[in-house]
């Protein structure tokens, strides 16, 4: 059986809760990512900030903000004010068949992978798509 550790992304960009939304917006745009785990100074997983969370704290386009105005506001908001703290996480040894229902039933785009309170990776919808593609190629269903 495949485990979370077999498909998870281990090179994860993380931030701390004292950093600002301006940094979140910059990192998401630069690295084309939608989920940023939040850790403390000891790399202990403490929360998650998603692109959806960021959008919820963005000036409405109806207000016609320019990039400078949005950036100024973002610099004044600490991640701790916006991040999700009660986040379901999974362990690297967890069976993928246990993880899929968690993602589907909760409509999550990712799950942080934590071992002994430390963030060791993240498993995303994209990781499952990569696995599906690999398996389809193996079966001859994809070129």
Image (tube, grey):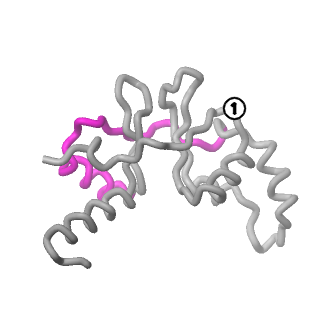
Decide whether residue 82 is among the magenta residues: yes
Decide whether residue 139 is among the magenta residues: no
Residue 95: % across, % down:
19, 44
The answer to whether residue 113 is above or below residue 142 is above
Residue 143: % across, % down:
26, 78
Name the residue tied to disc 1. 18
* Residue drawn at x 26%, y 46% as measured from the top left: 6
The answer to whether residue 100 is above or below residue 12 is below
Res 10 quadrant in image: top left
Describe residue 96's horizontal placement relative to residue 43 as left or right. left
Neighbours of disc 1 within 10 Å: few (<14), some (14-19), many (20+): few
Residue 55: % across, % down:
64, 60
Residue 51: % across, % down:
57, 57
Of 58 and 120, which appears nearest the observer?
Answer: 120
Of 135 and 98, which appears nearest the observer?
Answer: 135
* Residue drawn at x 57%, y 26% as measured from the top left: 40
Marker count (numbered):
1
* Residue drawn at x 49%, y 25% as measured from the top left: 44
Describe residue 53's horizontal placement relative to residue 128 as left or right. right
Q: Which residues are magenta?
A: 81-107
Q: Secondary structure at mark 1?
A: loop
Res 138 quadrant in image: bottom left
* Residue drawn at x 27%, y 68% as measured from the top left: 133
């Amino acid at each position: 059986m495949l485990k979370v550790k077999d498909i998870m992304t281990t090179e994860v960009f993380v931030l701390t809760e004292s950093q600002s939304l301006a940094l979140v917006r910059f990192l998401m745009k630069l690295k084309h990512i939608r989920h940023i785990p939040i850790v403390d100074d000891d790399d202990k997983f403490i929360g998650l900030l998603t692109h959806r969370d960021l959008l919820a704290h963005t000036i409405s386009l109806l207000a016609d903000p320019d990039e400078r105005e949005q950036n100024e506001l973002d610099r004044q908001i600490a991640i701790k004010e916006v991040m999700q703290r009660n986040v379901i996480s999974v362990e690297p040894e967890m069976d993928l068949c246990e993880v899929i229902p968690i993602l589907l039933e909760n409509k999550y785009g990712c799950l942080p992978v934590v071992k002994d309170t430390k963030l060791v990776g993240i498993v995303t919808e994209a990781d499952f798509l990569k696995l599906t593609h690999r398996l389809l190629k193996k079966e001859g269903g994809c070129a």
